[in-house]
Image (cartoon, helix red, strand yellow):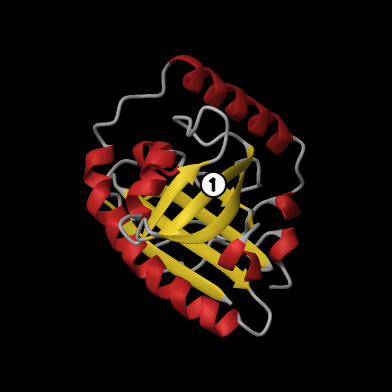
């Protein structure tokens, strides 16, 4: 089952892109319903590292929910002008383990209306066997609150400084690697939907064509 969000954020696309890669922003939009703690040596970095990141989640900061793997992928094909963060993680322990499929994508692009702001689109695909309807209902409610928090915080992102030091170098390395991969891709591997005012989904890509 799917949860979809789509709205315009009051910031430039570059600012939104930086924010969506930040564990700090992730924790801010999850609060106060969820408290997230890093289980990685050294704790949270300023930018989500590519690959698996282990976190522990508590409801209201009191009730343990379990351990979650946040598996970050920024290498997925995308339509020109659209940038996507893909979390293909999974629950490892506790209540989170009942979720058998977790596919979360956040896409940012320039607002087609020409406002200079950001068109934000969010899609979560979740499956939990016979518990899927109940899990979907709880996540749908949480996603609406999360969407409100994103819109509330977006105007402050415009004033965030650029990545610096190691984070800036890592971002440049990722961008170069992504450009090299895109140069080898066939048209069939590119998302089909351009960002338009009436678009309602991220687009279509080969591995999700049957969804």
Crowd band around label 1 with a 10 angstrom C-alpha radius: few (<14), some (14–19), many (20+)? many
Callout 1 secondary element: strand
What residue is drawn where x is 29% and y is 57%?
149
Residue 111 visible from this viewpoint: no
What residue is drawn where x is 77% and y is 47%?
186
Is residue 56 shown left or right of residue 208? left
Q: Position of residue 187 (x, y in %)?
A: 72, 50
Q: Position of residue 40 (x, y in %)?
A: 57, 35
User: Based on the displayed image, in which of its 4 quarters is residue 119 positioned?
Assistant: bottom left
Q: Position of residue 190 (x, y in %)?
A: 67, 51
Residue 100 visible from this viewpoint: yes
User: Based on the displayed image, in which of its 4 quarters is residue 53 positioned?
Assistant: top right
Establish if 46 lies above or below 95: above
Is residue 208 shown left or right of residue 74? right
The quadrant in which the C terminus is found is: bottom right
- Considering depth in this image, is 209 or 161 the residue closer to the camera? 161
Establish if 208 lies above or below 183: below
Establish if 123 lies above or below 130: above
The quadrant in which the N terminus is found is: bottom right
Is residue 177 shown left or right of residue 68? right
What residue is drawn where x is 75% and y is 42%?
185
Query: Which residue in the structure is indicated by mark 1?
Result: 55
- Considering depth in this image, is 17 or 149 the residue closer to the camera? 149
């Amino acid at each position: 089952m799917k949860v979809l969000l789509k709205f315009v954020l009051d910031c430039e696309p570059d600012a939104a892109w930086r924010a969506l890669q930040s564990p700090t922003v992730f924790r801010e939009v999850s609060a106060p319903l969820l408290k997230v703690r890093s289980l990685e040596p050294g704790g949270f970095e300023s930018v989500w590292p590519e690959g698996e990141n282990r976190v522990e989640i508590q409801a209201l900061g009191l009730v343990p929910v379990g351990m979650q793997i946040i598996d970050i992928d920024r290498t997925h094909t995308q339509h020109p002008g659209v940038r996507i963060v893909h979390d293909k993680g999974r629950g490892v322990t506790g209540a989170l383990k009942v979720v058998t499929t977790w596919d979360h994508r956040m896409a940012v692009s320039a607002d087609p209306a020409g406002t200079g702001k950001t068109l934000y689109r969010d899609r979560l695909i979740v499956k939990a066997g016979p518990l899927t309807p109940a899990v979907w209902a709880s996540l749908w409610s949480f996603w609406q609150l999360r969407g409100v928090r994103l819109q509330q915080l977006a105007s402050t992102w415009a004033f965030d400084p650029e990545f610096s030091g190691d984070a800036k170098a890592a971002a440049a390395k990722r961008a170069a690697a992504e450009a090299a991969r895109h140069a080898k891709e066939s048209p069939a591997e590119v998302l089909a939907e351009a960002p338009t005012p009436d678009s309602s989904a991220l687009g279509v890509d080969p591995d999700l064509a049957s969804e």
